[in-house]
Image (cartoon, coloured by chain):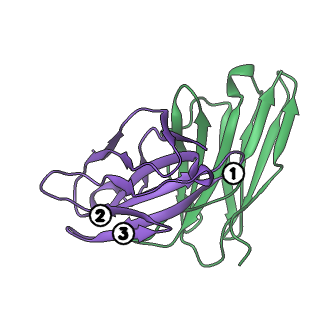
Chain colours: A green, B purple
Amino acid sequence: DAGVIQSPRHEVTEMGQEVTLRCKPISGHDYLFWYRQTMMRGLELLIYFNNNVPIDDSGMPEDRFSAKMPNASFSTLKIQPSEPRDSAVYFCASSRQGERTEAFFGQGTRLTVV
Amino acid sequence: GNSVTQMEGPVTLSEEAFLTINCTYTATGYPSLFWYVQYPGEGLQLLLKATKADDKGSNKGFEATYRKETTSFHLEKGSVQVSDSAVYFCALRSTGGSYIPTFGRGTSLIVHP
């Protein structure tokens, strides 16, 4: 398997624009997580899905953020409208069921909002 | 709830020095413990794990022992190399936390030649 695949790797956009980040999890994994990483806050969980169903989105900072998982092999994180404080690295991770299994991370999308 | 606390960095060492990065946790249920490593510009990748008390995880010369009595999972390496320079994250996943991986803040390690 190629691992978790995220696109794009880098995104530079102007304030107010819509941004869509994409993720393809590892086949057969039941869980998908979206994290945001910044120097100030470290690694924050934004939302996670179990079997394509959103379970907990309490980490989504504002209504400007939304996430979908239309099928087991694809998820999106959308920011509309984007703001400079959204600049961060966004990671997607997937895993199998169970507390003994590790999460596998994508390489991340570095978002810069100017 | 679940939480992970690890020592703040950066940790700066000379090559071949001994490394310890401290990690303690609080958890409901029965946690498994993990160390991840993040190299510059990359995502986190699993370094080692332990799934029950007194288990020792090891990989690439790194070791950590699951100590339930002290709720700790300290990372150690006997002789670090320049190529070990990275950010290290302690994490847990527990039956009591809906299986959500919980991460520490990360500790940056810088190894000088």
Residue at image coords 54%, 71% = A30
Q: Closer to the camera, B64 or A89?
A: B64
Q: Is residue A13 above or below residue A49?
A: above
**Left or right side of B44 for B89:** left
Q: Which residue is mark 3?
A: B57
The residue mark sitting in front, 1 or 3, is 3
Q: Amino acid at mark 1?
A: Glu
Q: Secondary structure at mark 1?
A: loop
The residue mark sitting in front, 2 or 3, is 3
Q: Is residue A92 above or below residue A64?
A: below
Q: Are marks 1 and 3 in contact (CB under 8 Å)?
A: no
Residue B42, numbered label: 1
Using the numbered discs, state the Cα–Cα distance from disc 1 to disc 3 in whole angstroms.
23 Å
Q: Amino acid at mark 3?
A: Gly
Chain where mark 1 sits:
B
Residue at image coords 44%, 48% = B17
Q: Are marks 2 and 3 in contact (CB under 8 Å)?
A: no
Q: Is residue A111 above or below residue B58?
A: above
Q: Closer to the camera, B22 or A71?
A: B22
Q: Position of residue B23 (x, y in %)?
A: 32, 46
Q: Position of residue A5 (x, y in %)?
A: 75, 62
Q: Secondary structure at mark 2?
A: helix
Residue at image coords 37%, 55% = B76
The N terminus of chain B is located in which quarter?
Answer: top left
Residues indicated by labels 1 and 2 sit on the same polypeptide chain:
yes
Q: Position of residue A24 (x, y in %)?
A: 73, 64
Q: Position of residue A3 (x, y in %)?
A: 69, 70
Residue B95, numbered label: 2
Residue at image coords 50%, 73% = A96
The C terminus of chain B is located in which quarter?
Answer: top right
